[in-house]
Amino acid sequence: MLSVSIKKKLKTFTLNLEFDVDHEVTALLGPSGSGKTTTLHCISGLEHPDEGEIALNGCVLYKNGEKPVPVQRRNIGYVFQDYALFPHMTVRKNILYGAKNPDQVVPLAETIGIGHLLEEYPGQISGGEKQRVALARAFATEPELLLLDEPFSSLDVKVKKECYEELLRLHKKWSMPIILVTHDREEAETLADRMIHIDHGKQRVES
Amino acid sequence: MSYSPLILSLQIATIATVIVFFFGVLLARLISRKIFPGKSIVEALILLPLVLPPTVVGFGLLFLFGRNGPIGRVLWEWFEFQIVFSWVGAVVAAVVVSFPLMYQSASAAFQNYDHNVENAALTMGASKLKVFFTVSFPLAWPGLLAGLVLSFARALGEFGATLMIAGYIPGETDTIPLAIYFAVEAGKMEQAYMWVLIIVALGFSSILWLNWWTKRNVMAFRQTK
């Protein structure tokens, strides 16, 4: 379980959040610039909050006045908005990069439906395929928590629907906590068990 | 006629390029993407040798490394080593004039790709060193290589600062550009022609090779469907 209680001063407002995430899909919903990505950065360790506490499965990742656990040792998967695939590596090498269990890379790729793309470079595959590769790459690190930053925003409607189903299927299979950042209410309603609204750094409603 | 100017030029340019590449890449990676007070002043200082007349650079080096200069004195008193009027002086001159080219290319190269790929590698458990060698460096490599070739060509062609700090000592500091100047001075036009041809061929082929290499290797993974 993840528990977050953080404060961080941003340019025009202060991010002030407090929530828990269990083995479910939680959507962080809010307009652009509301502090969603910063929240994910703080959880993953790419940035640090000014104060508060972040704990995952009993392990304190960040706490006031203590040295935060570095990003490399948090074991949190992160799928970036533009996927951030390594353009100079094949799909296979992308997935292998942080894989805990290299033997599982091929079965994993097949489960996610990209088994036939392993020798291609990211520049040679479509947006939907890239999105799957990014998911596979994050899953291969066997994370305790998965963060998705607007992972479907650059896909067309048909591909988006397929990816939604894919994600729900994988979540059912592996049942790990997922935080999904989105500004699309419909997307949040389709995928999430729970929604947290953020606006100008403040948590508004929880449904 | 001796071939020493060719060998000496290649030796000096190679050593200078290795030094410039190492420090240029390091410095560019450390500061090019950071914002800190005084950054533009630091960058202006780095790029200064690019716009100054080489004689001014040579004058500055002479001041620093001369027997009475702040660095020159220490080197002489501690190691009895003198940079002025030695081939090491020519290396120092080549380093200073080619450093801005390497820094500029490297700085652009490190800003030329999506930085989230580095963040992604970090979230996958890679150490900062691993991220640098497996992600940042390969992605910046085309730009770094361009800087490397430009720096080498600039180091090879250095004349003004070299003459000021290393002088013209046949067999010791007579690089090709200096050999050309002094051959013309002495009326040995045939010798000058030959060195001119050699240095044009060297410069031309390195640029040609760089263009060919870039087309062949960089476009490979940038291809889109």
Image (spheres, grey):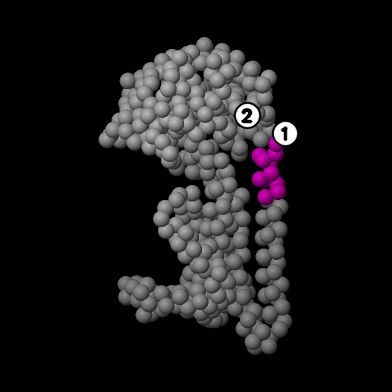
Residue A177 on the magenta span: no
| Residue B164, above or below A80 | below
User: For residue B207, what is the image quadrant?
Assistant: bottom right
Residue density around tag 1, few if under 14, some if 14–19, many if 20 or more, within 10 Å:
few
Q: Which labelled disc corresponds to residue A85?
A: none
Residue occupying the point 61% across, 49% down: B142
Which residue is situated farthest in the top direction here?
A172
Residue occupying the point 49% across, 43% down: B132
Tell me, yes or no, whether dots 1 and 2 are on the same chain: no
Which residue is situated farthest in the bottom direction here?
B186
Q: Which labelled disc corresponds to residue A154?
A: 2
Residue occupying the point 61% across, 37% down: A87
* Residue type for callout 1: Lys
Q: Which residue is mark 1?
A: B225
Q: Residues in magenta?
A: B214-225
Residue B217 is situated, as x and y percent measured from the top left of the image, at 67, 45
